[in-house]
Structure formats: C-alpha cells, structure tokens
C-alpha cells in the first residue's frame, strides 16, 4: 500500500497547529518555575547530553505518562500550572508529540524549533545525564 501522506506533511500540519519557541525564547525561561523542558528523544540519544533541567519522557511513552488514567502516568505531567516544552533531535518528533498532547486536551504544551541540534548549535546550556542525576540527588 503506498503512503498517501508522508512524514513531512504530518510534521508541517503539526507545526501549523502547535506553539513553537526558538532556542533563545526557551533559554530565557530556563529558570522559570512555571516551565518544564521535556526531552522526548530515545534513551540512546541522551549520551550526547540534554538541556539543563529537562525531564526525560521517551516519545514512545509520552501519551501514557501524561494520561492520569494510564497505569504509567507520571505525576510531573499533572501540574497544569506548568508549561511543558518538548524537544527531540531536530524538532520533527516534538512537533508531532506536541500535537498529540494537544489532541489529548493539553493546552500547556509547546516545542523547541530545531530541537537538540539547534540547541547545541546556538551554544545553549547542556548537561550530561550524570550531572543531572547528581543535581537531583542533592535536592533529595
């Protein structure tokens, strides 16, 4: 069966319907307690590091972690006062994921234009998983 709508069309449709922030806009809000950055990349992609203070929610589990009716629900996503800003490698998966969460009823979700690649290209702050784990352990 031939593909009648390719990934690019899906991404373009999603981009037209979701809030997209530039790296600079997100960087300016990194210390804002009302913002939670969410890294939806595959665990194997995290060896490169991640955005400072981000929470990892693999793309394949995102809808399950967000839905309070799911046995996999993560409480972090129950905070309606926060804006969840997603990113992936290039901004395609995060656009689709943001659209999916909007379809679930979330209005407090957006994504980063260009994803991790653009974040790194612009020299925005990153941290290794080890650094992130150490910070969380120090807070506990």
Image (tube, grey):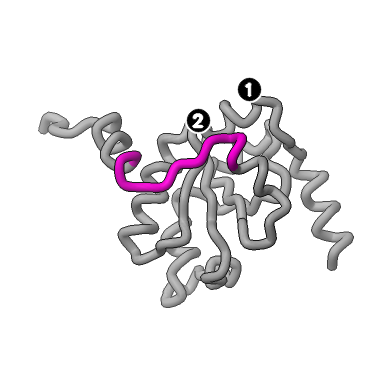
User: Residues at badges 2 and 1 in contact (C-beta under 8 Å)?
Assistant: yes
Residue at figure coordinates x 65%, y 38% from the top left: 46
The quadrant of the rendering that contains the C terminus is: bottom right
> Is residue 46 rendered magenta in the image?
no
Question: 15 left or right of 51?
Answer: left
Residue marked by disc 2: 114
Residue 104, compared with residue 10, is above or below; it is: below
In the structure shown, which secondary structural element does the residue marked by tag 1 occupy? helix
Specify the farthest residue to the bottom: 69
| Label 1 CA crowd tier, 10 Å (few <14, some 14–19, many 20+) | few
Residue 126, compared with residue 55, is above or below; it is: above
Residue at figure coordinates x 60%, y 43% from the top left: 26
> Is residue 21 rendered magenta in the image?
yes
The quadrant of the rendering that contains the N terminus is: top left
Residue 122, compared with residue 138, is above or below; it is: above
Report the disc number at residue 121: 1
Report x, y in % for residue 119.
62, 31
Question: 88 left or right of 45?
Answer: left
Report x, y in % for residue 12.
29, 34
Stretch of the chain drawn in magenta: 15-25
Q: Earlier in the sequence, mark 2 or mark 1?
A: 2
| Label 2 CA crowd tier, 10 Å (few <14, some 14–19, many 20+) | many
Specify the farthest residue to the left: 1
Residue at figure coordinates x 39%, y 58% from the top left: 101
> Label 2 to label 1, Cα distance in Å?
10 Å
Report x, y in % for residue 113.
48, 34
């Amino acid at each position: 069966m031939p593909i009648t709508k390719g990934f690019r069309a899906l991404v373009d449709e999603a981009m037209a319907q979701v809030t997209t922030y530039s790296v600079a806009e997100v960087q300016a809000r990194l210390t804002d307690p009302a913002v939670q950055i969410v890294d939806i990349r595959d665990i194997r992609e995290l060896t490169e590091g991640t955005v400072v203070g981000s929470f990892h929610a693999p793309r394949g589990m995102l809808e399950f972690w967000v839905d309070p009716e799911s046995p996999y629900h993560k409480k972090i996503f129950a905070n309606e006062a926060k804006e969840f800003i997603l990113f992936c490698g290039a901004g395609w998966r995060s656009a689709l994921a943001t659209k999916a969460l909007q379809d679930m009823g979330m209005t407090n979700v957006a994504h980063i234009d260009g994803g991790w690649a653009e974040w790194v290209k612009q020299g925005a702050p990153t941290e290794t998983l080890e650094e992130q784990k150490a910070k969380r352990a120090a807070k506990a």
